């Protein structure tokens, strides 16, 4: 089913656009992308630093790219994790658009496909949740900090599950007439 969706340029572009936007937001939430002012510069570090963990499923950067608009911490493993989740979010949201725009091609309600965004939001929450927890207080932070580290793996599983669910509900032979 995913192959059928990606066979259409319109849907392939939508998946790519959504994935790029989500990846940028994911890296911004991780603070691998920050706004800054300054001159263009590139500073590199030891490539083995990419395996140094800065948190659960978060890794250190091997380069810092500064531009007049933003600073980008190049962390290959964080980028790979973000790409994986962003691809799944893009597929889920594209399938949700298909389910919403073409209800007769889908055996579920149009709103049912919107569920695909929730796991992606969960993965994004793994990045900024510790800051929110600090605002709530030490008790809430201590209790919930252990669960925050599992948000990315849980989101990954939920994204795959929701993608499987929506692809089982969509009829690919009817999708061709709407792909135009």
Image (tube, rainbow, N blue to C red):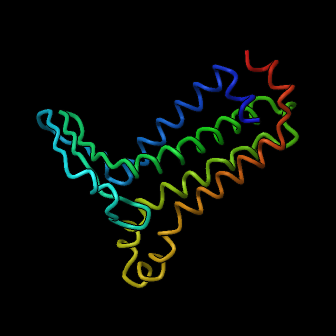
> Is 17 positioned to the left or the right of 130 in the image?
right
- Residue 170: percent from left, percent from top: 82, 37
Q: Residue at x 69, y 45 (%)?
A: 114
Q: Residue at x 47, y 37 (%)?
A: 21
The vertical placement of 120 against 24, above or below, is below
Q: Residue at x 64, y 58 (%)?
A: 157
What is the quadrant of the C terminus in the image?
A: top right
- Residue 8: percent from left, percent from top: 69, 21
The vertical placement of 58 against 172, above or below, is below
Q: Quadrant of residue 40?
A: top left
The vertical placement of 17 against 60, above or below, is above
> Is 85 positioned to the left or the right of 57 in the image?
right
> Is 154 positioned to the left or the right of 115 in the image?
left
The residue sitting at the top extreme is 180
- Residue 149: percent from left, percent from top: 47, 69
> Is 17 positioned to the left or the right of 102 in the image?
left
The residue sitting at the left extreme is 39
Tell how many labels. 0
Q: Quadrant of residue 134?
A: bottom left
The residue sitting at the bottom extreme is 139
- Residue 67: percent from left, percent from top: 19, 34
Q: Residue at x 66, y 57 (%)?
A: 158
What is the quadrant of the N terminus in the image?
A: top right
């Amino acid at each position: 089913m995913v192959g059928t969706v990606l066979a259409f340029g319109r849907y392939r572009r939508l998946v790519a656009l959504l994935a790029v936007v989500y990846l940028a937001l994911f890296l911004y939430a991780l603070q691998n992308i920050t706004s800054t002012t300054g001159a263009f510069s590139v500073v590199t570090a030891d490539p083995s630093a990419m395996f140094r963990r800065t948190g659960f499923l978060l890794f250190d950067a091997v380069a810092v790219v500064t531009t007049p608009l933003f600073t980008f911490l190049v962390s290959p493993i964080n980028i790979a994790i973000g790409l994986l989740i962003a691809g799944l979010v893009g597929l889920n949201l594209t399938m949700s658009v298909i389910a919403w725009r073409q209800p007769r091609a889908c055996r579920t309600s149009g709103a049912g496909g919107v569920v695909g965004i929730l796991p992606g939001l969960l993965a994004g929450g793994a990045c900024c949740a510790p800051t929110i927890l600090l605002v709530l207080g030490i008790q809430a932070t201590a209790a919930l900090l252990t669960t925050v580290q599992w948000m990315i793996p849980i989101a990954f599983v939920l994204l795959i599950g929701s993608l499987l669910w929506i692809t089982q509900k969509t009829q690919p032979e009817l999708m061709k007439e709407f792909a135009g």
